[in-house]
Amino acid sequence: MKMIGLTAGRKYGNSEVLVRAALMAAQASSGAEIELIRLADLTIKPCIGCEKCVYERFAGREGKCILKNDHLQFLMDKLMECDALILGAPSYCSRPPGYLLMVQDRFLSVPSSYRKRLAQKPIVKGVIAVGGSDMVGVMLPILNRCPGMNMKLVDQMMVLWTSRPGQMLLNEAAIARAGQLGENVARAAAQKPEDGTYISKESNENLGSFDRSDYDLTTQLTPIQEACPVCHSDLIRLRGKTAECPMCYMKGTVEVNGGMATFVCDPVNRPSPYAGVAGRKRHDDDGILVADKLVQEKRQEISDKGRKYRSGITVIRPPEIAK
Ligand SMILES: Cc1cc2nc3c(=O)[nH]c(=O)nc-3n(C[C@H](O)[C@H](O)[C@H](O)COP(=O)(O)O)c2cc1C
């Protein structure tokens, strides 16, 4: 079994310490082959929004990204080879660093064969988030969907108030928890997809009544209340009389029992509008392809109206950068 650690933080930084602890524990418990990739070592160009990959896929082809001379393919190949991923990142402005988000955008171009492979044997994933303070707003929901969406989350942890380089090395409880996360991910990777849920039991054990200020002051390990039972996001958005998970769009209601608020939803009878074949149809056929047909029909009108917005303002070009 092959496990990759992917870090989006400083070299030997706080998140890297935990990712390494997770990898080492996974290797010790399961004999996994382990490797580490630092995202900062890779050159990843930003998605330019051409959507060529999407149209290629719609046409039944692979749908590879047209951007060349960067490390996206390398990263995809590495992930394709692995069974399990440990993703670690610090909080930057309450979310993961921008270069991880750039990778996430580029994963729109995951080719068809890759998607098929993930459908047959999903890569299982553990997520490690580190905050210099407790400003970690959308860390877990975003990390849970990174780099690509079709990975199975097994375990997640978050450590707060760890800002200084090397500080994590003093936190034995967090390092032990990262080790447990690595073991959980390794165990799930050894299961067959049909063996049922991938989510480790242990990962739910530290869920309790939750208050953002209620983390353990000694270890800075924060309890994680998974709000959405489908994608394990810890966010819920209120939508009038209903509520929805803003990450997988699962709909439900918020109920308070014994002072504990929970998101109640019915994933079987009322799945996410984006789930499965029906979800794909809603997104692709009823959404994108309908809009595409409209744009084709109104091509002349779009061209006429667009003239006003194509001239009259000087576009400043940046100087060339040395290669
Ligand atoms: C640009 C930048 C923005 C940051 N924003 C936040 C933040 O919003 N919330 C937070 O808790 N920590 C924030 N931090 C602190 C880092 O999360 C913290 O230093 C962390 O330990 C870095 O992890 P690393 O050593 O793995 O890189 C920020 C740091 C940087 C450099």
Image (spheres, grey):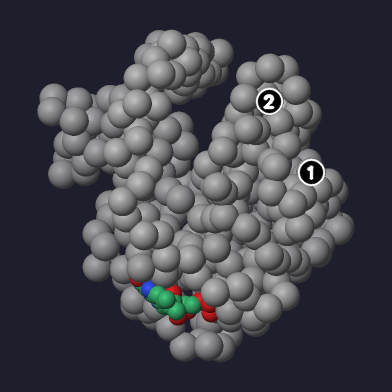
Q: Residue at x 61, y 29 (%)?
A: 54
Dividing the picture into quadrants, the one containing residue 162 is bottom left
Answer yes or no: is residue 202 visible: no
Residue 18, picture quadrant = bottom right
Q: Residue furthest left?
A: 240
Depth order, front residue of 243/101:
101
- Do callouts 1 and 2 mark residues in contact (Cβ within 8 Å)? no
Q: Which mark is residue 80?
A: 1
Amino acid type of disc 1? Answer: Met
Q: Which residue is mark 2?
A: 56
**Secondary structure of residue under mark 1:** helix
Residue 111 visible to an observer of this rendering:
yes
Q: Position of residue 235 (x, y in %)?
A: 32, 45
Question: Which residue sits at x=55%, y=59%?
Answer: 100
Look at the image and tell me in which quarter the C terminus lies.
Answer: bottom right
Q: Residues within 10 Å of mark 1 (few under 14, many from 20)?
A: some
Q: Nearer the viewer, residue 177 or 254?
A: 254
> Of residues 140 and 259, which is closer to you in this image?
140
* Residue type (three-letter) at the residue carrying disc 2: Glu
- Residue lying farthest front? 312
Dot 2 falls on a residue whose secondary structure is helix
Percent x, y of residue 47: 57, 49
Image-based side of 29 in relation to 50, left or right? right
N-term-proximal mark, 1 vs 2: 2
Residue 200 x, y percent position in the rendering: 58, 44
* Left or right of 233 in this view: 100: right
Q: What x and y, as percent, mark residue 32?
A: 83, 56
Between the C-alphas of marks 1 and 2, the distance is 20 Å
